Amino acid sequence: MTAAGAPVFDAGFRDTLAALVAWRRDVRRFRPDPVPEEILRACLDLACLSPSVGNSQPWRFVRVGDPARRAAVIANFSACNRQAAAAYPDERAAAYRRLKLEGLREAPVHLAVLCDEATGAGHGLGRATMPEMLRYSVVTAIHTFWLAARAHGLGVGWVSILDPAALVASLSVPPAWRLVAYLCVGLPQEEHADPELVRHDWQPRLAADGLLVER
């Protein structure tokens, strides 16, 4: 039985959803224009409707606006980026250094997305044998936020080349909060149909058929 007032997702909606997913990009080049507060809040509201284990809702969003804290994040990235480049052989290291892997200096909004691993919400349901489900739940909120932002014309860049413990310390958040993502958010400078890492020959898309295993 269909609930009264339940929406009908027709073919047109499904095509639009497919286009939204296909055109989602990890953005590293941002315009300096401020992000309207009502749009940011709308995207966060949608993110908070994401599924979570036991309905625990363990995501915690920290907007980082303090210049000193932002400077600490940039320094954190720079140190980790040098280490990452040094770990590759020469030719791949040179290709790595040519990539733009963050928009920390340009993005008007920085969001640290953390998992509250001490939350009592959900009463432990679904995570006795897989406690990592809390962090997986946070990832669903990140993806929802990313799609919502894209639908509003915003770009999102996920910066993962960071020391998470040092970053959390620089934010002065509760000790049980663990970093899952550091997001740069703003209006993108450009639009591309293909991901940047494909465009710069770092890694092509893998065929979906090759990622399904039958048993």
Image (tube, rainbow, N blue to C red):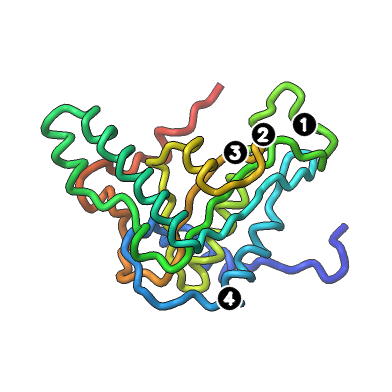
- The amino acid type found where label 4 is placed reads Glu
Q: Which residue is mark 4?
A: 37
Q: Nearer the viewer, mark 3 or mark 2?
A: 3
Residue 41: name its quadrant. bottom right
- The amino acid type found where label 3 is placed reads Arg
- The amino acid type found where label 1 is placed reads Gly
Q: Residues within 10 Å of mark 2 (few under 14, many from 20)?
A: some
Could you tell me which residue is drawn at 68 percent across and 41 percent down? 116
Mark with earlier residue (1, 3): 1
- Residue 31 is situated, as x and y percent measured from the top left of the image, at 35, 73
Report how far apart the C-alphas of labels 4 and 1 lie in the structure. 35 Å
Tell me the number on the disc at residue 133: 2
Could you tell me which residue is drawn at 62 percent across and 38 percent down? 135
Q: Which residue is mark 1?
A: 126
Report how far apart the C-alphas of labels 3 and 2 lie in the structure. 13 Å
Q: Secondary structure at mark 4?
A: helix
Mark with earlier residue (1, 2): 1
- Residue 193 is situated, as x and y percent measured from the top left of the image, at 32, 62
